[in-house]
Image (cartoon, helix red, strand yellow):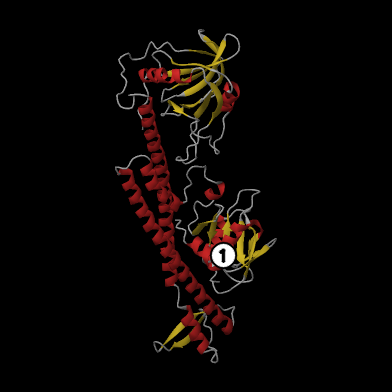
Amino acid sequence: MQKPLNWREIALLAKWIEPEIVGMFVDRVVVPDRPEFPNGYLKNEWSLRLTSRGKEAALLLSVRPRRPSVDLLSGKGPRASPHATRSGFDLGLNKILSGRKVLGFQAVPRERSAILWVESDGRNAFGLVLTLIPALPEALLIEGPREGQDFKVLARSRGVPDALYRFPDGAKSPPELTVRGEGFEDLDHYRRAGREALDLEAFETRLGLVRSRITQDLKQAKVRLAQNQRTLLEAEREGEYRHQGDLLKSVMGLNPSLSSENKRRVLDWETGEETLLLCDPKLSLKEQVEKFYSLAKRKDRRISEARLRLTTFEEKVSRLETFRSATDSIAISALRGKAKLSELAPFEEKLGIAVGAPERPEAKATHGWSGKSFVAKEGLPILVGRSKDENLELTFKFARGNDLWLHVKGKPGSHVVIPLRSKKNASLETLLDAALLCIHYSNGANWGKTEVDYTHKKYVKRIRDSSEASYVNNKTLMIEPNPARLRELLGQDII
């Protein structure tokens, strides 16, 4: 992080900047675009675009906590951020200062403050005061005669009510402060040092987000891994239902009697010994055989799904731990500035972390989903369930009412969800991407043309005492096989 400016350095900057901007006019006040930062802009940072005949400049002002600064760029400076939220303060600045002439830019003597003077009406002037104290920076707009002592406060960035402003006298400031050598040779060196500090800040911010996401996902993956290990162990310990069904089926003609303990005695041909089978007294012999086979199918399914999810979570844990080691190496590497950001970018993409714009609400809705995730061409996430357990979790625990839900028409298969914001919908291209994934994970590679239903999740209900779902208010897509498009989707490497 760049060292905070002391009052002597602020005075030197004002000395360099003032002759460059006096006589220019404020064109507009914008929030600068910062595509290297997660949200695409920085709160409490503004760019005053200045113009005059044959000349343009941008005065960058920042009153961010711990990082206040001021700088002057030639040309228009950074473009306005399309993602920034405008506060009442900077909207007021834009309204009051636009079109007005710059009268001066001065440091407050022996204080970490500077003021931009802009023409007003009559004897008065508008002053944009910048307090560059790292612990409590702020900007405020004042009005009054430049030689006056008390000024009317028109607006301030911190929103503290105060009718009048008086410049501090600097009596308590240390006099022995010096100007740093490096970065203060001239305005170009200062600007270059500021750019490097901003790149480092962007890297540290994004690295923190990556580490936080890795820690969060790793914790969740390990919990789910342990849960599925227990599920697999419990399933493997269940009775040999298929063998029991075979034994009982082989003696159906003999109709073995049911004991007082609800057991039937049969001969186990594998061991040559008699064994007792616990049966339901309410079921006939045929129904009991069917129940044993049903329990055997359930056991096989539980084992199969637990193994599938174990493999998934083991791979996820391994990859996340690899990511953590790799990002730690980037953090301590000798790379600087944008080179470090470039090294970090692939990991952000794999973790689904957006950079340069606020995270979309749809993307936030995917946090916590441990199954397969994809991103459609228009940027919407697509979540896929690959087993009965994942389908139930995705549809009835994870998805929200307005989300789109897809399923192959008339066949058992995968549940697919497209998270949506309220009153929003997905494009046809996104629906086609989701439908292709729905068919693929329903083992429909050889089905040819296939119908896929879609509806809002709020119209999907679970059938009582079943793992199946029913739905209404659906529409149907007729999907043609598209191997190239499917390969592109499956090639996404999202954790």
Residue located at (30% from left, 15% from top): 176
Looking at the image, is 369 positioned above or below residue 446? above
Q: Residue furthest front?
A: 54
Position above or below: 242 against 418: below
Where in the figure is residue 415, as x and y percent of width and height?
57, 63
Residue 240 at x, y = what percent? 45, 78
Residue at the extreme right of the image, as rendered: 473
Q: Is residue 226 visible?
A: no
Q: Give the image quarter of residue 412.
A: bottom right
The residue lying at 42 percent from left, 56 percent from top is 221
Looking at the image, residue 84 sits to the left or right of residue 459; the answer is left
Residue 94 sits in which quadrant?
top right
Amino acid carrying label 1: it is Leu
- Quadrant of image for the C terminus: bottom left
Q: Is residue 191 visible?
A: yes
Front residue of 416/195: it is 195
**Which x, y percent locates residue 147?**
50, 7
* Residue denoted by label 1: 436
Secondary structure under the numbered disc 1 in the rendered image: helix
